[in-house]
Amino acid sequence: NAGVTQTPKFQVLKTGQSMTLQCAQDMNHNSMYWYRQDPGMGLRLIYYSASEGTTDKGEVPNGYNVSRLNKREFSLRLESAAPSQTSVYFCASSEGEEGRANLYNEQFFGPGTRLTVL
Amino acid sequence: QKEVEQDPGPLSVPEGAIVSLNCTYSNSAFQYFMWYRQYSRKGPELLMYTYSSGNKEDGRFTAQVDKSSKYISLFIRDSQPSDSATYLCAGNTGGGNKLTFGTGTQLKVEL
């Protein structure tokens, strides 16, 4: 099992450029998440998908869009990158499905994408 | 005010020391509390979780939750250089999948 994989590992963009960050999991998990991690701010949820076919905004969704392509894949798109989006982006997945009785629901994280917007 | 507050450190201790890492939270609905460990340039990984108040021990690690004071602690006994990492606490209401993370505390265990 590869777990959660992310591509690319590194990316440098110019202001205004667009790009898509890819994430895939092979654990048959229902829920998937996109976070950004900045110094002093911790992990902040951008978007999440509680199950295939659904997506919801997290704490910091502005400037991003997501697509839950199928149960395995959850992509994050920056339509017009800004320097404020320079960050490390993590994708995560967990077994639970929204609306069902949940236990603690461990999230498994990918290795991250380091994005710099000039 | 963030829902989960954590001293960012860095915290530097000698090998063999007992380490205490702490968080406070404001959401009374939190039922589950987790500690994630994140090595440099890696993704976080779950270290321990506890449900409601009480203690949980796993080897050299003990997680403690006091819901009356909204205080979460992680104790590391006989700390090792391999424990050098950032430790993130997180809370979950149990009614959904989302976690709320603290900012993380950077720990360095020196030889």
Image (cartoon, coloured by chain):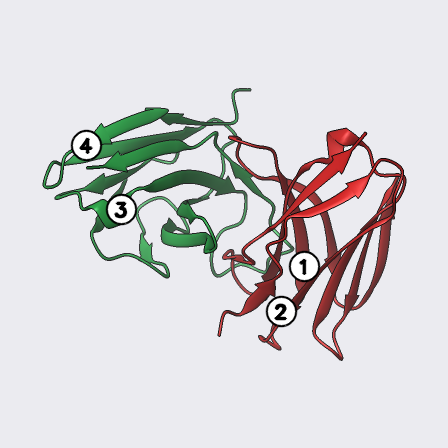
Chain colours: A green, B red
- Determine which residue is flagged by label 3: A85
x%, y% of residue B21?
Answer: 74, 55
1 and 2 marks in contact (CB < 8 Å): yes
- State whether residue A76 is above or below residue A63: above
Label 1 and label 2: CA atoms lie apart by 7 Å
Instruction: Evaluate whether label 3 is on the same chain as label 2.
Output: no
Circle 1: element type: strand
- Determine which residue is flagged by label 4: A13
x%, y% of residue B76?
Answer: 83, 46
Chain ID of residue with mark 2: B
* Front disc: 2 or 4: 4
* Front disc: 4 or 1: 4
Chain ID of residue with mark 4: A
Label 3 and label 2: CA atoms lie apart by 30 Å
Q: Residues within 10 Å of mark 2 (few under 14, many from 20)?
A: many
x%, y% of residue A110?
Answer: 48, 32
Q: Residue at x 70, y 74 (%)?
A: B70
x%, y% of residue B24?
Answer: 65, 69
Tell me the quarter of the image containing the C terminus of chain B: top right
3 and 2 marks in contact (CB < 8 Å): no
3 and 4 marks in contact (CB < 8 Å): no
Circle 4: element type: strand
- Determine which residue is flagged by label 1: B33
Work out whether residue A48 or residue B3 is closer to the camera in this orientation and state it: B3
Q: Residues within 10 Å of mark 1 (few under 14, many from 20)?
A: many
Q: Check disc 3 and give the amino acid type.
A: Gln
Label 3 and label 4: CA atoms lie apart by 10 Å
